[in-house]
Amino acid sequence: MLDTIDAVRAALRANDEQPHGRQRTVTAEELVDAAEQFDEPELLAYALLDLMEAYENDAERRKLPVVFARIVTLRKKHPDAFDGWARRATDWRYKWVAHALRSVPDVPLEAVRRWHRELREYYRTAGHDLQPYYGEQYHLAALTGQDVEQAFDLWAGRRRSSFSDCQACELRAQARHFVRLGDDRRALGVWQSVFDGRHSCAEEPHVSRAHALLPLLRSDRVDDARSFHLTGYRWARGRSRAAEEIGLHLEFCALTGNEPRGLEILADNRDLFGQHGDPLARLHFLTGTQQLLARLAATGHGDLPVAGPPGTSWTVDALLADLRTEGDALAARFDERNGTTAVGDARRERLARTPLFAEPLALGLRAATPAPAPAAAAAVQSAAPAANESIAELVHRARELHDLRHPEAVALWRRIEALATADGYRHPDDPELGPLDLLRAELAEQRARRDGLPDRELAAHLTEAAELYQQVGRTAQAIGCRALALVLPEQDADADSEAGSDADDPTAELDAYEQQVRELVEAEAPRTGDALLTVLHAKAVFAIRQDVPESHRHLGDDLDGRDLTRTETAIARLCEEAVRQGDAPTEVNAHQLLARAYFLTGRQEAAGELIEQAEHRIEAAEIPWKLVAVHGWQGEFALHREEFGRAEELAQRGLKIAAQYGDRSAVPARVQMLLARVHLARAEHESAARAFTEAAARFDHAGEADEAASARGRLGQTLAETGRYADAAAVLEAVRLEPGFAALDVREQAQVRLDLARTLRELDEHRAAAEEFLHVADLAAGWEDGQVHTAVACEAAVALARAGQWPAADLARQRALDSHRAAPHADAAFDMLLRLARVTADTLGPDARDEALARLDEAAEVVEHARREGLELGSGSPDGTLHDTRGRTLVGLGRPEEALAEMELAIAAFGALGPEGNLARAESIRYAALVEGNRLDRTQDALTRLEAAVAWCREIGEPQAAEVLDDLHTHLRRQH
């Protein structure tokens, strides 16, 4: 109830803590109404100022002038109702009104200029510097295109003042000026101090990251552009005030070939279509959206459903037409108001931009919206044979390439499928081509060979192919397809159990298939040789599954020394038949199958010998495209031997061959992953991040959703390890939503979420971090290694406390301690309790004395229990750490005298540890001096302590610690 002044004040304070957005704005409007019922001008002033702030940050600039007029009137009538903060806030908002008037085309230009004159006169009378006035003059000039250089010089050449925009925002405006002039290099130079963190604010560097995307791309700083898109959009997503920046991120997607990502962004921000409170920002959003839609329409996706204004179903073409009309009209209104063509010219220049890359720029993300498929007509056109190449000739060439396992066969079969399934297709009467059902059988079999298909789809394609082959009398090929389908992993059961039932064992059926095909070979039926190799390959695959179960590979069991007799026998028979038929590709594949089995079971030397044999066979048969996988394996062996240079050379060689022969399968993607791991092994994190990004994009193209998710998980982990937490969070948050994420092993899922939780913690997003820690704790609850659950539960408790979720934090702490009792992890429990004590004291203050000290008592109990049970503690001196933390906690509780006594105990405990405790002892000395100097006003005692400590650190060879202590000594001496 808002029926008292105190209740309204409390509500104003509570609303001030809420994030900006529609709910805060609505509440601010309600609080103005509530304040008006009282004869309390000060209360109404605060309510109106808060409402104006809500409008400014919720893209409701149209409403700002009316509210400000009420504030000015109230201030004239009741000047005493405005304290120092309210007076300054009112003076600051003169600039907001200038911005609002400039952003609404319905406001005449003369009215905007009249407000500028009023701002100038007010600031001059109030004794404020006029630099902010000249800033508003420049922004208006930049919008109208009149006297821009002169206005820029008058503003940028003046010294900043107390009412200037923050330095980061002013640098953004200056950089954008140079972007408009086409001087990207100078613009990026101006922006550098914002991007490296020297200047920042609530909006920066996030807003600047959006505006810098195009200059970065044009300057070939692709890695920076990718990073700025990931981190900048993560901030902008769902913010009504960020409509212009979201438009720039949409433009980025259009210019980099990431249209599916753009569709995601559009869906995320659909509410922006209904917001008209800031027409200039809306125009920028509409223009960016139009750029995206125009690219989709130009590539044949006009009928694709797309997120548009709520209440109607939209396609790309329909929304594009609607936005084009509105955007052109809105730009024309600005130009008519301004008396120039500057706004329309800028819009037309943006819409004329074309993609900057021949291939999509890999972002390290998978668009949740599937990459839109071309319309049927477009597909047929792209697949149409040359004038002198019939479909019969295409199929003949595809069959030849398939027999050679040439990667270009994949694209060629897809071209054939597009032609054969198009409306109006007429199948030629060609004996060499064969009947239509034969072609359909071949196409179904080729679909089954595509990477990344679920086993159910593979089985369906193989079954379809087998039926069609049977219908046209190709019995051997039908048997081959059935054999492959037979050895697919079970869908609803664990097919990898070592003791499967006889009913689940396909050996008898496979033997029968082999016998049938051999009989067909003797009868000289067509394609029987291929079918025999297919059946033998299926038997080899099943043998490997028996000897090296897939489930054990996921769980990381020790497979060294496992008996591979079945595998060796099956592959020997496959190789023998391949040699007899002169089928080099199949022989090479067989060597690789056995090499993989050897590698998984710890027989690297034998695996290496097989891969060398495969390389020689490839060279002799002149099928160099098969070297991609071979070089990948050789690189794996080199990495295993820590021959990093050799591993990189082999991976690069494999990728070069893949590019040369158009191999876009999962094989080069795995080689790219190898390259990423080589870079990680050499601590080349930036190169590793690029390689993981490229690997994920390759896996996406190959259809390997789970491996793509795994690559992006590694990418996020790598970014976090280099301190790029915002980038890492953007990647890892997206990984959780990928279809392939659910297919990952549960431990890998847990690792992705754990990395995300730690990343969010570093970004101070503690509530979101706590949710992820709790997810990981749930995943780990049933694991045999219970210490993982204990450690993660401890992290969750601290994150909940930092998020202010105290009841949940207390429950999580109890859960963690229960887990610690069942599966002891003394370090995690000890650290959790110490951090909880600090957070409790620092956040809740003296009122939480008992709770904070109770956590410290529990930490002491953990130490004692660990000592009794002989458990190891990572802290060199748990007693010293406990005293140090108790001292810092007592400072937060307002008890500095007791805190100093605890620090003395910590110093002594670390000193007793010997050289291993020197740095911890120096840190405790530093904090003790701070307590003496700043809390107890014993500056001289602090200086004396520091002088002795500096001399001691230099004596023991710790110059950095000495420097830190000396800096504090200098600071306290000046303060004294």
Image: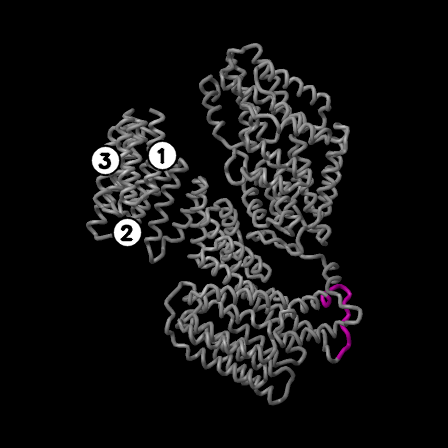
- The amino acid type of the residue labelled 2 equals Pro
Image check: 679 left or right of 962?
Answer: right
Kindly indicate whether the residue at mark 3 contacts the one at mark 1 (C-beta within 8 angstroms).
no
| Residue that protrudes farthest toward the bottom in the picture | 522
Asked which secondary structure carries label 1, the reply is: helix
Q: Earlier in the sequence, mark 2 or mark 1?
A: 2
Q: Report if residue 421 lies within the magenta region.
A: yes
Image check: 892 left or right of 467?
Answer: left
Q: Depth check: 588 or 645 in front?
A: 645
Image check: 879 left or right of 306?
Answer: left
Q: CA distance from mark 2 to mark 1?
A: 42 Å
Q: Which mark is residue 824?
A: 2
The image position of residue 164, as x and y in percent, is 57, 25
Q: Which residue is mark 1?
A: 967
Vertically, is 782 above or below 198?
below
Q: Which residue is mark 3?
A: 904
- The amino acid type of the residue labelled 1 equals Asp
